[in-house]
Image (cartoon, rainbow, N blue to C red):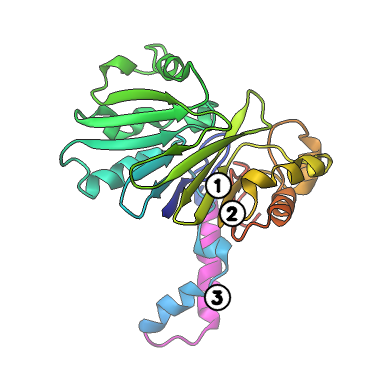
């Protein structure tokens, strides 16, 4: 399976500010000035060795992950503002040809995880089928509510795609025709949230955004090893520094320190931190 993160910011979109962009460019130019680069072919190599905070951005869009199975089936996890670019990329790749099916999994419906739905172009296209999976029996009502005329100019029922709402609950395992298997697990977060585990040909990917793990939860974390243990890739909430997490106890998010602790306890092979605090710059 191939995993692409289209949105990694928590709470609300946080595009790069002009001042942050300027600071990055100036530091890159200063580093370039220190090098004796005389050939254009060396520029790419110079760029590849820049530190992460200069080479990348922390991401401005809110939560959305795209997963493609080995057989090419498309899965989307959460509908934050990042899903707009998922839709754009799907259309560029020829997604319009014939009837198309997208499997969409929703962790929870706080606004930063569903606010991109209205800007997801396949949502409006006849012939596209969107299968929405979640533990929430009223998920359709929640989508309809955020598209009321007082909030958005297009009514949910005016969109031309076919929408199907399907249930998944802890203990369930859904198996798709491409061999992907999906399970879910409840997480500690105001209003509730769920992690999703995707398995394919012996490889395991787990998406666990919007979850609060603290030092007091270590015994419970160990008990979760049946679900999380040995994952090849784990994407997990890490919104705060450890110091800030103490000030925001019970807000429903994890420090990056505890995220690393969780991955260590579970024996995770590769850890990816997400749901970054919108007030943090890339350096932080």
| Precedes in sequence: disc 1 or disc 3 | 3
Which numbered tag is attached to residue 231?
A: 2
Q: Residue at x 39, y 13 (%)?
A: 148
Q: Is residue 190 above or below residue 122?
A: above
CB-based contact (under 8 Å), mark 3 and mark 2: no
On the image, the x and y values in percent for residue 102 come to: 32, 37
Number of the front mark, 3 or 2: 2
Magenta extent? 20-39
**Is 35 included in the stretch rendered in magenta?**
yes
CB-based contact (under 8 Å), mark 2 and mark 1: yes
Gap in angstroms between the C-alphas marked 3 and 2: 38 Å
Secondary structure beneath dot 3 equals helix
Which numbered tag is attached to residue 206?
A: 1
Gap in angstroms between the C-alphas marked 2 and 1: 7 Å
On the image, the x and y values in percent for residue 262 come to: 71, 50
Find residue 181 and report its image quarter: top left
Per the image, the residue denoted by label 3 is 31
Q: Residue at x 54, y 43 (%)?
A: 9
* Callout 2 crowding tier (Cα within 10 Å): few <14, some 14–19, many ≥20: many
């Amino acid at each position: 399976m191939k995993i692409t993160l289209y949105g990694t910011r928590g709470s609300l979109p946080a595009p790069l500010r002009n001042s942050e962009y300027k600071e990055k460019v100036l530091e890159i130019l200063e580093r370039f000035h220190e090098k004796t680069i005389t050939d254009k072919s060396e520029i790419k190599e110079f760029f590849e060795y820049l530190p992460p905070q200069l080479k990348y951005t922390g991401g401005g869009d809110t939560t959305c992950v795209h997963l493609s199975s080995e057989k090419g089936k498309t899965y989307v996890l959460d509908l934050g503002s990042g899903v707009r670019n998922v839709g754009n990329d799907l259309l560029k790749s020829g997604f319009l040809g014939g009837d198309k099916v997208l499997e969409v999994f929703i962790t929870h419906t706080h606004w930063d995880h569903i606010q991109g739905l209205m800007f997801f172009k396949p949502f409006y296209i006849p012939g596209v089928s969107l299968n929405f999976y979640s533990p929430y029996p009223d998920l359709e009502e929640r989508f309809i509510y955020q598209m009321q005329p007082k909030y958005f100019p297009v009514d949910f029922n005016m969109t031309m795609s076919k929408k199907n709402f399907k249930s998944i609950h802890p203990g369930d395992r859904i198996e798709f025709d491409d061999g992907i298997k999906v399970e879910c697990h409840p997480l500690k977060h105001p209003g509730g949230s769920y992690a999703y585990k995707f398995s394919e040909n012996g490889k395991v990917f787990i998406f666990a955004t919007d979850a609060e793990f603290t030092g007091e939860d270590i015994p419970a974390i160990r008990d979760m090893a049946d679900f999380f243990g040995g994952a090849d890739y784990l994407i997990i909430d890490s919104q705060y520094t450890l110091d800030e997490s103490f000030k925001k106890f019970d807000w429903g998010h994890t420090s990056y320190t505890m995220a690393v602790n969780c991955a260590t306890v579970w024996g995770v092979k590769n850890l990816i931190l997400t749901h970054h605090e919108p007030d943090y710059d890339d350096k932080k």
